[in-house]
Image (cartoon, rainbow, N blue to C red):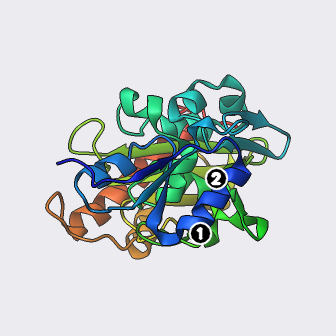
């Protein structure tokens, strides 16, 4: 199928983009990488009358690393973030996760901010956003505002964004020095949406765990954080209480059944991935020290 007819807008500034969105309201969609939007249009699951193509807007294609965060502009492609050595050094979880996003060809066009705005619970980067305490920078006709990632997602494909607002950047929070991170997911085929996935951050004092948190892919309605500190704090990295972790994860996730896998299988898979990732992260196998 082909997309229904629409009007293509090519603003050159954020202000122009917001002005168009204000004019067209709910009949408009923002186009950045288009790797999620275009298939939806072609299948006519959505038929907006206006596409606001922000690819010509200057200043949205940069990655900035500061002592507090890694700021990713709305036109930064997944592949660009994956290759950014400064971002990977400051927050290894970004590279660990983004390399799991679909196929290299899709990562070449798809944008990290776009994946957040799309709000698919099967996306990798929303889980990373909540785990790192990310903040989204939003522009609209009423000015700019900042939205914490843990309050940004309302449900599958639903966010707090108004129809006339545009996400211009996301600031992923850097983790305390010494934090170990890991990411893993399982899919039926390489590049498919994950049946389940997990992002993990483990804080340590020497070889003793002082804190641990996890966020999941495809097994919760919206990305959220499971605090495993009460389970793991005080444990030695080589003798983690993995059975207790398994129980905590199984109680936390809330997967749905679909044609690809049942809810019970996804729940089991999320727990197993968490255990394996914890073990590999504790061993330093994922090179995840922040």
* Quarter of the view holding residue 266: bottom left
Which residue does the image show at 42% across and 40% down from the upper left? Answer: 101
Residue beneath the point at 32% across and 61% down: 47
Residue lying at 32% horizontally and 62% vertically, measured from the top left? 46
Q: Is residue 136 above or below residue 288?
A: below
Q: Is residue 211 visible?
A: no
Report the mark closest to the observer, 1 or 2.
Answer: 2
**Is 53 rendered above or below residue 129?**
above
Considering depth in this image, is 40 or 76 the residue closer to the camera?
A: 40
Does residue 91 lie above or below 18 as drawn?
A: above
> Would you place residue 197 above or below residue 243 in this image?
above
What x and y, as percent, mark residue 14?
70, 49
User: Which residue carries the number 2 mark?
Assistant: 17
**Residue 134's x, y, as percent?**
68, 56
Q: Is residue 82 left or right of residue 204?
A: left
Q: Residue at x 32, y 70 (%)?
A: 255
The residue under label 1 is 161
Whether residues under marks 1 and 2 lie with C-beta atoms below 8 angstroms apart, the answer is no
Q: Report the Cα–Cα distance between label 1 and label 2.
A: 15 Å
Q: Which mark is residue 138?
A: none
Quadrant (top left, top right, bottom left, bottom right) of the C terminus: top right
Kindly state the secondary structure of the residue where label 2 is placed: helix
Q: Secondary structure at mark 1?
A: loop
Residue nearest the observer in this picture, 108 or 211: 108
Q: Residues within 10 Å of mark 2 (few under 14, many from 20)?
A: many
Q: Dot 1, how many residues are within 10 Å of its Cα: few (below 14), some (14-19), or many (20+)? A: some
- Judge whether residue 214 can be spotted in this image: yes
């Amino acid at each position: 199928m082909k997309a229904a007819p629409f009007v293509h807008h090519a603003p050159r500034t954020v202000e122009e983009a917001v002005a168009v969105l204000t004019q067209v309201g709910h009949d408009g969609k923002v186009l950045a990488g288009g790797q999620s939007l275009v298939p939806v249009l072609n299948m006519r699951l959505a038929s907006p009358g206006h596409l606001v193509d922000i690819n010509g807007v200057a200043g949205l294609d940069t990655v900035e690393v500061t002592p507090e965060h890694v700021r990713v502009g709305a036109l930064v492609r997944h592949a660009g973030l994956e290759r950014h050595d400064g971002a990977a050094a400051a927050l290894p979880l970004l590279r660990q996760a983004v390399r799991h996003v679909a196929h290299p060809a899709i990562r070449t066009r798809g944008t990290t901010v776009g994946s957040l705005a799309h709000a698919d619970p099967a996306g990798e980067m929303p889980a990373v956003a909540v785990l790192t305490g990310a903040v989204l920078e939003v522009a609209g006709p009423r000015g700019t505002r900042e939205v914490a990632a843990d309050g940004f997602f309302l449900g599958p494909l639903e966010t707090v964004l108004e129809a006339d607002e545009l996400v211009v950047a996301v600031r992923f929070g850097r983790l305390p020095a010494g934090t170990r991170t890991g990411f893993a997911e399982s899919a039926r085929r390489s590049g498919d949406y994950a049946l389940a996935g997990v992002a993990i951050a483990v804080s340590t004092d020497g070889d003793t765990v002082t804190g641990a948190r996890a966020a999941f892919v495809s097994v919760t309605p919206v990305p959220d954080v499971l605090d495993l500190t009460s389970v793991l704090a005080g444990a030695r990295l080589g003798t983690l209480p993995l059975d207790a972790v398994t129980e905590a994860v199984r109680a936390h996730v809330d997967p749905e059944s679909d044609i690809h896998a049942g809810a019970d299988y996804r729940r089991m898979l999320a727990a197993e991935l968490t255990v394996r990732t914890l073990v590999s992260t504790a061993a330093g196998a994922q090179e995840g020290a922040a």
